[in-house]
Each structure stands twice: as structure tokens, then as C-alpha cells.
Amino acid sequence: MPSYKSVHAAGLDLSAAPEDGKARTLQPGDIAVVPCGFQMALEPGYEAQVRPRSGLASKHGITLPNSPGTIDADYRGEVMVPLINLGREPFTVEAGMRIAQMIIAPVAHARLEAVTELDDTERGTGGFGSTGL
């Protein structure tokens, strides 16, 4: 089961739970979907955000290719985590190893409206880096 590892932890740690119980080695550049061994039902109006663990990312280059990943409230399958090895060395994912963290967060649904023009702002259409470094 996911669990908080400290009193003020924001995320629940997710652990690897491969069906065969065997370790899996990720070569540099490899992506693998790692099962976590549980299913869950979120209350409507909530999502689970799956994020990398900072220690795995900073020490080994192990992260998520779609960070943060979203688990919707209507999903009922097994929780699985896609991992990518961006490091320079092979990395072995062992059964029971903490591989990601999960944040439960409220979801706001927007009301979309098609318009022919938008109001002006100081930034305007300035994109990446337009507000400075």
C-alpha cells in the first residue's frame, strides 16, 4: 500500500510490485512501466498526480517520462508507473523499491467558450522566456 513516510510528507510513496517479483534493469534510455500492485477508487473531483522521487532522479537519473502523470477518479485498473533511465549507468528496480510519489489533489473543471478575439495583456503573445530570466 502507498504510504506517507513522514508526518508532513505531501506525497504517498509508491513501490514497485512486479507480478513475477523479479527485479528489472533499465539500461540508459530505457522506459519501463512498473506495476505497483494495487488498485484504488478516488472520490469524484480528485485526481492522483504521480511524480518522480527526487533521490532517484538526482542520484541515478530515474524519472517519469510524463511527469506529473495523472490518474483520473474513474480509473479502476492497477496503478503503474512509467520510469525512464536518463542516467549514464544501468539501474535495477527491485520489488518493494520506492519508485515514485503520489499526490491526491482536487480537480477544477473549466467552462470553455469559443471567442473570436482575446483581451490584451502586458505580456501579449510573448512565449518562452519573454518575461526574462
Image (tube, rainbow, N blue to C red):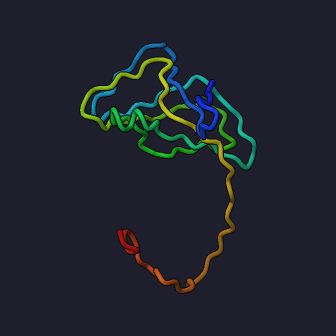
Task: Identify the image quadrant of the C terminus.
Answer: bottom left
Residue at the right extreme? 43
Q: Position of residue 38 (x, y in %)?
A: 62, 25
Asked which quadrant contains residue 112, the reply is bottom right
Residue at the left extreme? 88
Q: Decide which of 22, 102 is in the foreground and name it.
A: 102
Give me the residue at 60% from left, 81% from top.
115
**Horizontal relation, residue 118 to residue 87: left or right:** right
**Horizontal relation, residue 48 to residue 53: left or right:** right
The image shows residue 69, relative to residue 40, as above or below, that is below
Give me the residue at 45% from left, 45% from top.
66
The image shows residue 118, relative to residue 75, as above or below, that is below
Q: Position of residue 4 (x, y in %)?
A: 61, 31
Q: Decide which of 109, 53 is in the foreground and name it.
A: 53
Give me the residue at 29% from left, 35% from top.
87
The image shows residue 89, relative to residue 125, as above or below, that is above
Q: Position of residue 110 (x, y in %)?
A: 67, 64
Residue at the top extreme? 21
Q: Position of residue 64 (x, y in %)?
A: 43, 40
Asked which quadrant contains residue 10, the reply is top right
Asked which quadrant contains residue 39, the reply is top right
Q: Decide which of 22, 58 is in the foreground and name it.
A: 58
Task: Identify the image quadrant of the N terminus.
Answer: top right
